[in-house]
Amino acid sequence: MLQRIQSIFLLLAGAASLALFGVPFATTLQPVEGSMLFADAAYNVQDQVALMVLFGLGGVLALAAIFLFRNRLLQMRMSIFAIIANFIGVVLGVLFYMQNSQDVGERTINDGIGAYLPIVAIILAILAYRFINKDDKLVRSMDRLR
């Protein structure tokens, strides 16, 4: 049911989470030997299994919630779980980066679009949750009038 605004937000949130599998969080100009994250000159989701699971789960939950438009409470729960998965993924991504930033030394690290996509996914999922909640309140008020 893509004509509802929350479905559009959920679609975009899922796309932003799953797009992380194709874009890096950060890059260096040359590979850094001895670094776990920048050995291939790019820090991306595939460098850590936990990040792959969390961002994949967040994207799949957001996309699956689109098709639960008849069960708004379950749709809201799945949106919350997508937000939580993306938030934990952001925190873990920053922690992994901070732990391995000493390995880079004085090389320049350029942030990529992947550094901002999880934040966008979280914001879009929050907006979707708000519109689902608004829709649920509207339906409940109409049921009360009948």
Image: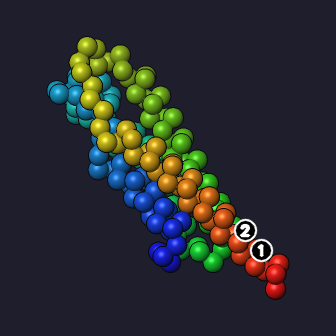
Residue at the image point whose x is 51% and y is 48% from the top = 122
| Residue 108 drawn above or below residue 72 | above
The spot of residue 109 in percent (x, y) is 27, 25
| Residue 69 drawn above or below residue 104 | below
Residue at the image point whose x is 82% and y is 86% from the top = 146
120 and 68: which is toward the camera: 120
Mark 2 in CB contact with mark 1 (< 8 angstroms): yes
Left of 70 or right of it: where is 55? left
Q: Amino acid at mark 2?
A: Lys
> What is the spatial separation of the Cα atoms under label 2 and label 1, in whole angstroms?
6 Å
Tell me if mark 1 has few (under 14), some (14-19) or many (20+) residues whose alpha carbon lies within 10 angstroms of its own: few
| Residue 20 drawn above or below residue 128 | above
Q: Which mark is residue 132?
A: none
82 and 128: which is toward the camera: 128
Q: Is residue 47 visible?
A: no
Please identify the quarter of the rendering in which residue 38 is found.
top left
| Residue 105 drawn above or below residue 96 | above
Determine whether the residue tagged by mark 2 lies in a helix, strand or loop. helix
Q: Residue furthest top?
A: 106
Q: Residue furthest left?
A: 30
The spot of residue 125 in percent (x, y) is 53, 55
Residue at the image point whose x is 46% and y is 56% from the top = 13
Please identify the quarter of the rendering in which residue 105 is found.
top left
Query: Which residue is the site of mark 2?
Result: 137
